[in-house]
Image: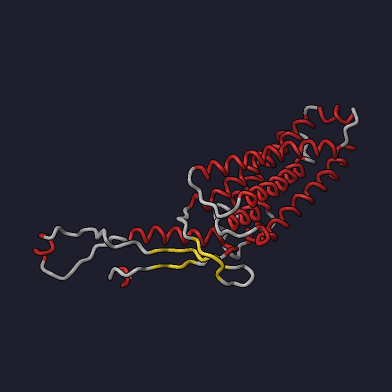
């Protein structure tokens, strides 16, 4: 504060925790707003009340510059500082990945689930099977269709955000790869939860409730306190790993190998969900 008062250059270096990006960048945005307010603080000197009033009262010193704030990105393996972020990051940069993943959930997970349930409820699935269509073939057709729909929707929402000024340190190939992995995982997840439902109403209710729970308790919009029971449940939600990987790549500039753990978890979710959906649907439809 004394350096700021004496017109000396002031600077704050913030090192975010890669495992708590949302909390770290929330602190960054608060300090950034505070530093802007500190620029031009009034400078009151001793003197008589008459002199103070005749000088115009409290004024704003426009020559005092706001302190600088930089994000120092740590290397997750060595702990050393690997790079600096000098971009003006805001809340929109932090939450844009969350919105893109939510779009994938809506179009992939809810979309494919409702489609499968409607096909079974309307009797079309029985007609398809009577004409020789296998369960795994039916699942594959639905999977490909809604995987593409979710892919297009997420790309559209992400680049709309980029068009309106969202910063990203990731390359286009890295973002597209994360979108592909996320779409794969959530499409398979939606097929799994629709494999044992009979009506579109029950499927829609189940998938909507699941989507809402992941949005609220997935640690992507509202930070979950450490040590709570919900914090342990979050580890079983694929949305957490998708948003974490996206934020690390987009905001902190990490490469795909540095988020390989999150990518691996998403692939495991997708593969297991896909295999289980084939097994469950084949057994349910035999009855």
Judge left or right: residue 198 versus residue 234: right
In the depicted structure, whether residue 1 falls above or below residue 248: below
Picture quadrant where residue 230 is located: bottom right
The residue drawn where x is 68% and y is 58% is: 262
Picture quadrant where residue 157 is located: top right
The residue drawn where x is 50% and y is 59% is: 25
Q: Quadrant of the C terminus?
A: top right
State the image coordinates of residue 119 (x, y, percent, origin top left): 77, 30
Colour mapping used in the image = secondary structure
Judge left or right: residue 71 versus residue 114: left
Viewer-closest of 222 and 79: 79
Q: Quadrant of the N terminus?
A: bottom left
State the image coordinates of residue 251 (x, y, percent, origin top left): 55, 56
Viewer-closest of 177 and 229: 177
Instruction: Using the rendered image of the protein, determine whether residue 72 is visible from the camera's viewpoint.
Output: yes
The residue drawn where x is 42% and y is 62% is: 31
State the image coordinates of residue 225 (x, y, percent, origin top left): 56, 62
The residue drawn where x is 57% and y is 62% is: 20
In the depicted structure, whether residue 147 falls above or below residue 8: above
Instruction: Using the rendered image of the protein, determine whether residue 204 is visible from the camera's viewpoint.
Output: no
State the image coordinates of residue 52 (x, y, percent, origin top left): 13, 63
* Labels in figure, total: 0
Outermost residue, left side:
50
Judge left or right: residue 265 versus residue 68: right
């Amino acid at each position: 504060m004394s350096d700021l008062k004496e017109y000396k250059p002031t600077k704050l270096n913030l090192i975010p925790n890669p495992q708590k990006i949302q909390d770290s960048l929330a602190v960054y945005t608060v300090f950034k707003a505070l530093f802007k307010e500190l620029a031009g603080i009034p400078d009151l000197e001793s003197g008589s009340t008459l002199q103070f009033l005749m000088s115009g009262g409290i004024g704003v010193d426009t020559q005092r510059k706001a302190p600088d704030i930089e994000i120092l990105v740590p290397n997750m393996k060595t702990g050393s500082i690997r790079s600096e972020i000098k971009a003006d990051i805001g809340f929109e940069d932090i939450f844009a990945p969350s919105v893109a993943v939510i779009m994938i959930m809506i179009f992939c997970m809810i979309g494919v689930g409702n489609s499968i349930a409607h096909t079974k409820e309307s009797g079309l699935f029985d007609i398809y099977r009577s004409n020789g269509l296998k369960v795994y073939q039916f699942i594959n057709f639905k999977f490909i269709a809604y995987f593409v729909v979710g892919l297009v929707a997420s790309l559209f929402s992400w680049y709309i955000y980029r068009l309106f000024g969202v910063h990203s340190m990731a390359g286009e190939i890295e973002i597209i790869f994360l979108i592909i992995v996320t779409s794969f995982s959530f499409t398979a997840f939606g097929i799994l939860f629709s494999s044992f439902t009979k009506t579109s109403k029950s499927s829609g209710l189940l998938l909507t409730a699941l989507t809402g729970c992941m949005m609220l308790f997935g640690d992507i919009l509202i930070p979950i306190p450490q040590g709570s029971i919900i914090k342990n449940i979050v580890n079983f939600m694929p949305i957490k790993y998708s948003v974490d990987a996206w934020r690390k790549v987009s905001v902190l500039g990490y490469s795909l190998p540095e988020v390989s753990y999150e990518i691996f978890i998403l692939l495991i979710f997708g593969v297991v969900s896909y295999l289980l959906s084939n097994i469950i649907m084949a057994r349910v439809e035999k009855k």
